[in-house]
Amino acid sequence: MLRLLACVVVLACALMVPAARAQDAYPSHVVKIVIPVLPGSTTDIVARLVANQLSETWGKPVIVENMAGAAMNLGSEYVAHADPDGYTLMICPPSPLAINQLLYHDLKYDPSKLMPVVLLTKIANVLAVRSDFPAKSVQELIAYGKANPGKLSFASQGIGSTAHLSGSELEVLGGVKMVHVPYHGAQPALTDVMSGNVDMFFDTLTTSVPLYRAGKLNLLGVASNERSKDVPEIPTIAESGIPGFRSITWFAMAAPPGTPVRLVEKINHDVAMIFRKPEVIEKIEALRLEVMGGTTADAKTFIGDETRLWSRVITEAHITLD
């Protein structure tokens, strides 16, 4: 029995060595980062920055593939069913990791099983309205909405997106009723706001501030706890008479279920090193983003907290998919 046990141990060790070496050599070929949104969004910009930097770090190609559709569930499902070998990853905004499971009961993947790798960046959302909108402040918008119930319209990147839930949060806390107009991504939503086809959109500062500076839309309120240094003249929504209002967009990297912990931690480490580079920090700040970082455990805890926050909004706003 002792000899048999010794043989088993030796065999197990022999099998573990190649696996360990394979992980040490990661990556040995192309790595694909799936983003479940259309090109041109903040998610797309962040993902391509990370991919370019990882290509330099690893000495292997890291490509980005846009896989939009089904409220970001199409790309998320693809990643969830991919081989857990580190060669298929996902970068996404909150919905696929913290929101969609609260709204969709027939998902073909389990968001809680996706493995958080690292929190990348975050940014406050801002209430953007068409340039000819009559209200020039959040309070005026609320008053207009109450005087014209059901006439205010707000755009989003799709049902369950941060913009959708932010608009719903404004309805609940502001006591107004609005019409939700979902789009397939941020870019077409922004385009229709600028064209005057829809009244408002909770967008990120990254894409809306340049348009605001160019006079293509107006900004009424920032959805963070403090004013943005990029547009200090714009008050927060909370200080504009909607206390407790908060909405940020964050971006995280996730891996398929079952990806070895050691491999996930390696990727976390390599991404963390990227975000310490002065030239990368400069690019991130130019996008009006803040670096998040932290361990894989930090990412899991944060996503759990965000899920609870939006679960409350969905419940209070009675959001359903009917």
Image: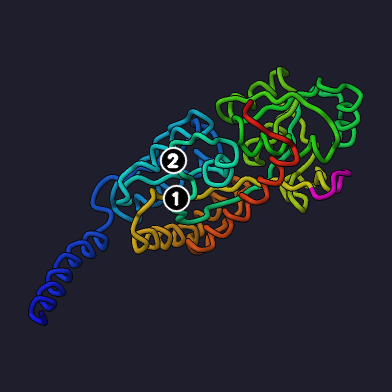
Name, please, the residue furthest toward the left: 3
Majority SS type along the magenta span = loop
Q: Which residue is mark 2?
A: 109
Q: Residue furthest front?
A: 1
Position of residue 25 measured from the top left corner of the image (x, y, whole percent): 24, 59
**Residue 243 falls inside the magenta stretch:** yes
Q: Secondary structure at mark 2?
A: loop
Who's the residue at 45% across and 39% down the image?
76
Q: Decide: is 37 above or below 101.
A: above
For the question of whether residue 215 can be seen, the reply is: no
Q: Residue at x 81, y 44 (%)?
A: 237
In this image, 15 relative to 253: left or right?
Answer: left
Task: Label 1, secondary structure: give it.
Answer: helix
Rendered-image quadrant of the C terminus: top right
User: Which is nearer the eye, 78 or 270?
Assistant: 78
Residue 257: give x, y in percent of width and height: 39, 50
What is the quadrant of residue 5 in the picture? bottom left
Does the segment drawn in magenta span residue 117? no
Residue at which label 1 appears: 113
- Disc 1 marks which amino acid? Lys
What amino acid type should be assigned to the residue bearing mark 2?
Answer: Tyr
Q: Is residue 218 visible?
A: yes
Q: Are marks 2 and 1 in contact (CB under 8 Å)?
A: yes
Q: Can you give x and y, in whole percent of width and height, for residue 61 in the image?
A: 30, 45
Task: Report the span colored magenta.
Answer: 239-244
Q: Relative to residue 83, is residue 165 drawn left or right?
A: right
